[in-house]
Image (cartoon, grey):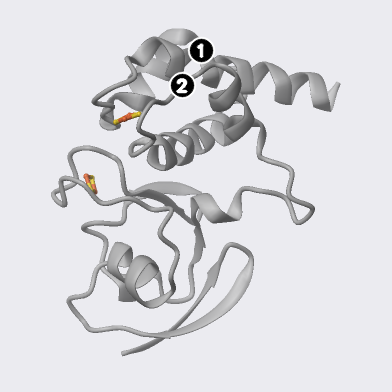
Amino acid sequence: MKIHFQLNGKDIDADCEPQETLAELLRNRLNLNGTKVSCEVQVCGACTVLVDGLPVSACTHLAYEVRDRDVLTIEGLESADGVLHPIQQAFIDEFAFQCGYCTPGMIMSAKALLDENPSPAREEIIHHMDGNICRCTGYLPIVKAIESAAQRTKEAKA
Ligand code: FES
Ligand code: FES
């Protein structure tokens, strides 16, 4: 199948099989390996990307379903001049990862939250992130990183 969509702000024409997942399209055909795949059954959140601003599990979302939609992956967060997104920088500053395998999905989920709610309470962060599993860092640094990113974004806009 031939599909057209927006990927990280660029127009993309791609071929995909009807049963091909968005994660397979991104990783295998478009060489965007930032999106990780772990459970492959929509449980762990490692493969989270945004489609029209909403978080989806790319491991189960079929590639053709993004036809004419707007897809954002971890590779699309950095600015054109190489400055990391505030959420990316906050994850670094708060030591919110160890192996880093869950991190792209965590950051994309956090972006969806902060886009919708720029000042979430800690309970709202924990509730929103409960679909993202981390096997090695512990969740407190991740929550703190998201709080820090929210604060930085607020200060940058003030
Ligand atoms: S790899 Fe997609 S949710 Fe786990
Ligand atoms: S940093 Fe290793 S799984 Fe989260």
Mark 1 Cβ and ligand 2 under 8 Å apart: no
Q: Which residue is mark 2?
A: 96
Q: Nearer the viewer, residue 68 or 72?
A: 72
Q: Is mark 2 within 8 Å of ligand 2?
A: yes
Q: Quadrant where the N terminus lies?
A: bottom left
| Residue 129 point in image, percent of width and height | 36, 26
Vertical placement of residue 106 versus 146, above or below? below
Which residue is at a point 59% across and 55% down the rendered structure image?
76
- Could you tell me the amino acid type at mark 2? Ala
The percent position of residue 62, horizontal first and vertical second, equals: 26, 68
Residue 18 horizontal side relative to residue 13, left or right: left
Secondary structure found at label 2: loop
> How far from the left and from the top, in percent, is residue 143?
45, 15
From the viewer's perspective, is residue 147 above or below residue 57?
Answer: above
Q: Are marks 2 and 1 in contact (CB under 8 Å)?
A: yes
Name the residue: 43% across, 84% down.
14
| Frontmost residue, 128 versus 91 | 91
Frontmost of labels 2 and 1 is: 2
Q: Is 140 left, or right, of 46 in this rendering? A: right
Q: Which residue is mark 1?
A: 144
Quadrant where the C terminus is found in the figure: top right
Q: Quadrant of residue 128?
A: top left
Q: Residue at x 56, y 15 (%)?
A: 147
Label at residue 38: none
Where does residue 123 sit, x and y in percent of width and height?
40, 9
Mark 2 closeness class: few <14, some 14–19, many ≥20 residues within 10 Å = many
As measured in the structure, the alpha-carbon distance from the residue carrying label 2 to the one carrying label 1 is 8 Å
Mark 1 secondary-structure assignment: helix
Q: Is residue 1 above or below residue 23?
A: below
Evaluate whether residue 106 shows in this view: yes
